[in-house]
Amino acid sequence: MDHAFFVFSSYGASALVFCALVLWLMLDGRARKRELAALEKSGARRRSDHNAKDGP
Amino acid sequence: MRDQRSKPGLFSGLANPTRFLSLSGRVLPFMTGITLLLFAFGLYLCFSTEADYQQGDTVRIMYVHVPAAWLSMMCYMVMAVAALGTLVWRHPLADVAHKAAAPIGAAFTFLALLTGSLWGKPMWGAWWVWDARLTSVFILFLMYLGIIALNRAVDDPGRAARLASILILVGVVNIPIIKFSVDWWNTLHQPASVMRLDGPAIDPEFLRPLAVMALAYTFAFFTMHLVAMRNEIFRRRVAAMRKVAANRAGRKAAVQPVKEGR
């Protein structure tokens, strides 16, 4: 194996890991926002809203 | 503390997740732009600068290996500060910060180990040796995995954050061991050549791409960390809303017979 193989494997692996991280962050964010939107649509509230209304 | 009319400082103001979300949302596009520009410039330098007279082209592996290794340690220090924030100041964002950073730190550590291995084979003749530097970084990788596992094993986020914080702070002892392993023990891994008291012992030809790539990695880390923190806040909101909805459904079910009786 020549040096180019090691150099390009390193850069390729780094690019792959970065892409995987970015993809995961984007998909995770999108899924969570979709869940939030669905919950808000169905009238669900957060505890902080609840406290503001019924708190002491 | 709940009184939002009194003017909070920046640090305690960020304890309000809504404020953090709007602030980070405004900063993120700029950070993404700067990261991409730095990577474009850094990668150009990586392949336009000269090869080493001894190592040949494999010196270019340094430009992705060394920043990944630096960031793997910096990420851990960011997590350690956040862990203090959880245990000492009980800052709500600190829990989110160290939980969100762990997978990113694990990825950087994995990259440092992988690219180091790909550099070790042509230069040392071995993919892996159990010398002090490599072993201590491998332990750092295991620490990250342990922290991620611990966070996932405990359901209550507050409890998970406190337990993970203790583990993170115990693991901090590994960071100086990694840094000074090359001085304290006989290692195949070379000693520091950039972060030295007597200045960098590396030619500017190699230092320039390395510095730009290190900056690019740093910006990439903070950008991804912000996004991961936002995702974690959204995840907690979903969980909180589901809990409230479940409680309300439970209460409704309990009062139902009374209502019917009326």
Image (cartoon, coloured by chain):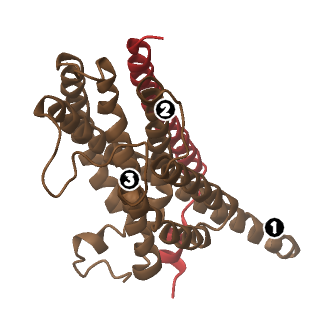
Chain colours: A red, B brown
What's the residue at 43%, 39% (across, down)? B112
Could you say where residue B60 lies in the image, as x and y percent from the top left? 29, 24
Which residue in the structure is indicated by mark 2? B117
Which residue in the structure is indicated by mark 3? B182
Q: Nearer the viewer, mark 2 or mark 1?
A: 2
The amino acid marked with disc number 1 is Ala
What's the residue at 40%, 74% (across, down)? B85
Helix, strand or loop under label 1: helix
Q: Quadrant of residue B48?
A: top left
Q: Chain of mark 3?
A: B
Residue B253: assigned label: 1
Q: Quadrant of residue B18?
A: bottom left
Q: Dot 2: within a 10 Å radius of its alpha carbon, few (fewer than 14), some, or many (20 or more) residues?
A: many
Question: What is the distance, in whole Å, between disc 3 and disc 1 at their CAs?
Answer: 65 Å
Helix, strand or loop under label 3: helix
Whether marks 2 and 1 lie on the same chain: yes
Q: Nearer the viewer, residue B36 or B127?
A: B127
Tag 3 and tag 1, C-beta contact below 8 Å: no
The amino acid marked with disc number 3 is Val
Q: Nearer the viewer, residue A48 or B148?
A: B148
Q: Dot 3: within a 10 Å radius of its alpha carbon, few (fewer than 14), some, or many (20 or more) residues?
A: some
Question: What is the distance, in whole Å, between disc 2 and disc 3 at their CAs?
Answer: 17 Å
The reply to whether residue A16 is in sight is: yes
